[in-house]
Image: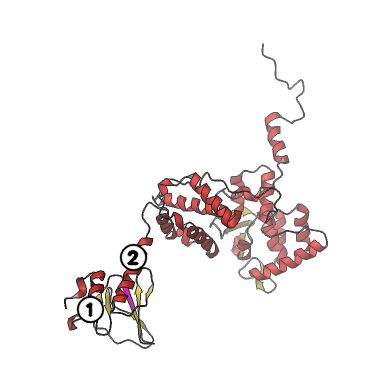
Amino acid sequence: MPDTGNLSRATWARRSKAAPLRCCAAQRVDRPPQREGRIRSLPEGLAEGDGRMMKIAGLKRFHDKRDGVTYNYHRKSGIRILAPFGTAEFALEFDRIDQAHKAKASVRGTLGHLFDEYRKTPEFKNLKPVTKEDYERVMVWCHRLRPMPTARMDSALVTGLRNRAFDEHKRRFANYVVQVISRVFNVGKGLGLTTINPATSVDKIRKPTGERHRNRPWTSAEREAMLEAAPIQLKAPLAFMRYLGARLGDVRRMENSSYEDGMISFVTGKGDVEVTVPCPEPLAEILDQRLPHPKFMFVSTDGPWTEGGWNASFRKLRARLELAGKVKPGLTAHGLRHSVATDLREIGKTDREIADILGQRTTYATPTYHRTADMKRSNAKVLADLHGSGKGRSKQTAEPELA
């Protein structure tokens, strides 16, 4: 029987139907004894059976001393091979798995390759677990487009994707598809994998007119009523969100070092953006009364706030104020972030200025926060700057006639 080390898997499979392959003594691999309970791996590319040994590139074998069983795997895909080792069925199953894995491999210049390379970047690896799962959901949903060359993708195609996502999963997921594609292409441009971003000019789908916003801004009266009724363990973090528009997740894990010498400085959990601002005087007065803790700025009477503990305490306070008629239904802690953005927009601040206060790296999502802003004050100021006081010009201020 010739040495099987140089035979292809297909040739080996055909020959093994007639007779089992057996190795000579020189081909055996000497291995030291193993300790009980440890799992060992055979040398790269070698596979051993009952008196048989074959050389298969891409095969991974593990022998478990605990049960005395040797397990066979396709190395790149991690799929276990169930057929008995040393048989034609084993070779055919390995070849089927290998071919299927190669068929899934992405080709450079395609959307699939761009997705695969994006998954290797720090931008993706550093995402929060929940955000990473959302990104994966979008990329898996786009699996039909993996062979699509990125050079052929344009705004019309992304708009079509957005519309199909809307039909299948409604508005929020459709907008998230646009967001993820835009992010992936931006990172891909930095990696030299593409020169375009087909999602840049694709608009998000807006809510239907009259549909209730999920995190509506709080009115001034609701903010004051909530702070007046809240115990200090709730009042301090609520005040922080009320004056600075910080996210609840950032507030809950904020440490004492974030507030020193009248300045507040922290790094957002979403986007990793540094925010440094002077502490407003009304907020400073409340922070000085907060419960002490050796590490965290905001704690409950039982220690650092947990998500469940915060939600339960906030719901009880909100329900009590709703029953008393001091606040309307629909208040959320995140709505305070919308309140700050709305106030800033109404006094004429730009999206870039608002994004800096909210701790956003880009202005892409900023309009979402101030979409309900009443622009009367800002518009009046703009027109006053353009046309004067707006009360009409007197004869003395009228422009002289040209001769």
Mark 1 lies on residue: 18
Q: Position of residue 380 (x, y in %)?
A: 72, 36
Asked if one can make out residue 230 in the rendered structure from this viewpoint, the answer is: no
Foreground residue among 44 and 272? 44
Judge left or right: residue 222 versus residue 298.
right
What kind of element bears circle 1?
helix
Quarter that holds the N terminus: bottom left
- The type of residue carrying mark 2 is Gln
Asked if one can make out residue 177 in the rendered structure from this viewpoint, the answer is: yes
What kind of element bears circle 2?
helix
Mark 2 lies on residue: 99
Judge left or right: residue 164 versus residue 187.
right
| Earlier sequence position, callout 1 versus callout 2 | 1
Q: Based on the displayed image, in which of its 4 quarters is residue 255 positioned?
A: bottom right
Please tell me which residue is depicted at 64% across the width and 61% down the height of the picture: 248
Return the mark for residue 222.
none
Please tell me which residue is depicted at 70% across the width and 29% down the height of the picture: 387
Label 2: few (<14), some or many (≥20) within 10 Å? Answer: few
Q: Based on the displayed image, in which of its 4 quarters is residue 301 positioned?
A: bottom right
Task: List the single residue furthest toward the left.
Answer: 2
Q: Position of residue 277 (x, y in %)?
A: 62, 53
Bounds of the magenta segment: 56-61
